[in-house]
Image (tube, rainbow, N blue to C red):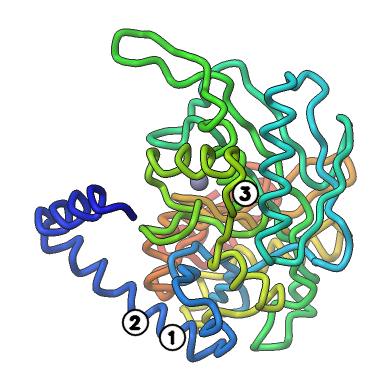
Amino acid sequence: MDRRSALRARRRIFGLAAASLLVAACAEPRAGVLETRFPALRDFPGQRLAEAHPFVLPSGGRVVQFFCRWPSDTPLPVSVPLDATEAERRAIDVALRAWEGAGLGVRFLVLEGGPAPIEIRFEDEALAIGAGGDMGNAVVDCQMAPLSQQTDPGAVREARLVRARLRIARQTAPSWQGKARPLTAAEQTGTLLHELGHALGFQGHARRGDTVMVREVERIPRVGAAVLAGEGFADPTLRALYRLPSGAVVSSTPVEAWRTDLVDRMARLAEGAALDGPFARVGESAARIFWRDPQGAEYGLVVIQIAEAIRRPETTRVVPEPRARRALPRRNDLRPGQSGRE
Ligand SMILES: [Zn+2]
C-alpha cells in the first residue's frame, strides 16, 4: 500500500461504525487459528488466507469449512476464446505467466477454444453482477468424494478443483451519464490476474494486503500495469493455499441435525442414482452444494448468508434449489416450520 492509500485507509478505519470494527477485530484471531492448525502457513508472511471464503460442507450434523485447489503435478488446460483480440491474447498470456511464476507450482496448458477445465470468455459489455465485480467473474467448482465416504475429520476426501469459468468484460459499466468505455490493457490484465486467482481456489476477497485478491477496484489495474511492465508478481496468499493439501479442513463444527438434513438426504438420493458429485461452490453471498445428472441437470442446495455462516458455522442455513426441492419429499423436512407441508 502506498502512503496515500494508507492514509486514506486509516481515515476510513477511524470513520467506521463500531460494528465494523468488531468484525475487523475478529479477523486476526482467525488468522492465528489457521496458523496454529497449519504451521506451514508461517512460511508466508503477509498471507491473507484467513480472509478467504472457504468451501462449506454441511453434512451429518457438522459444518466443515475447507480449502480446495487444483492438483499441481500436471499442467492445467486453459481454453482461450477464439474471438480474443491480439491485445486480449497478450493479457491472457501475461496473466497466466505471472501466476506460473508466483511459486504455486501450477503450470497452464493453453488450448485454442473448446472445452477445458479452465475456460476464459470475453463479454462485450460490463457484467451485471453487482458492485465492484463488473469487470470480471469466476465460477469455480470443487469436487469431492461421495459424502458417505467422508470419514476423515481432518480432510475432505478427494477434494480438488475441477472446473472454472471466467468471464472478462470488454467494457466498463456505464457511468452515471450512461457512458461505457473499453477496458484498458492494465484493467484487463489486472482483472484476468484477479479472476485467475479465484480460479486457482481463493474465493471471496482479502480486505487488504499484498494480494491481487482484494476487492479494491483501483488496486487491480495497478497490479495489471506492473505485470505488463515486466515487474515481478508474487502472491503469498495463493502460495500459502498451494502449500496446504487440497481438502484441508479449516474448521468442523457440530450443528443441529436439521441444518444439514437437506444435504444428507440429497446425498443419499444422489448416491443411489449415481449422480456426478458432490460439487461445492462458494461466492460472496452464498455457497452451494450440488450434484449433476447424466443430462447435466443440477440438484443444488444453497448455503445462504455465507459470510455470517463462515464466521458462525452454528448458524448455517441451507435452502434447496427448485429441482432439489422437487426431488426431496417435503413431509420429511426437518427444518423448523417445514415438516408436513406439501
Ligand atoms: Zn473477485
Q: Earlier in the sequence, mark 3 or mark 2?
A: 2
Q: Helix or strand or loop: what does disc 3 sit on? A: helix
Q: Residue shown at 52%/26% (left/top)? A: 127
Q: Which residue is mark 2?
A: 29
Q: What is the spatial separation of the Cα atoms under label 3 and label 2, in whole angstroms?
A: 38 Å
Q: Are circles 1 and 2 on residues that touch, CB within 8 Å? A: yes
Q: Residue shown at 41%/78% (left/top)? A: 31
At label 1, the amino acid type is Val
Q: Is residue 160 above or below residue 220?
A: below
Q: Helix or strand or loop: what does disc 1 sit on? A: helix
Q: Residue shown at 74%/80% (left/top)? A: 150
Q: Which residue is mark 1?
A: 33
Q: Quadrant of residue 252?
A: bottom right
| Residue 337 visible in the displayed image | no
Task: Tell me the quadrant of the picture where the N terminus can be found.
Answer: bottom left
At label 2, the amino acid type is Pro
Q: Which residue is mark 3?
A: 325
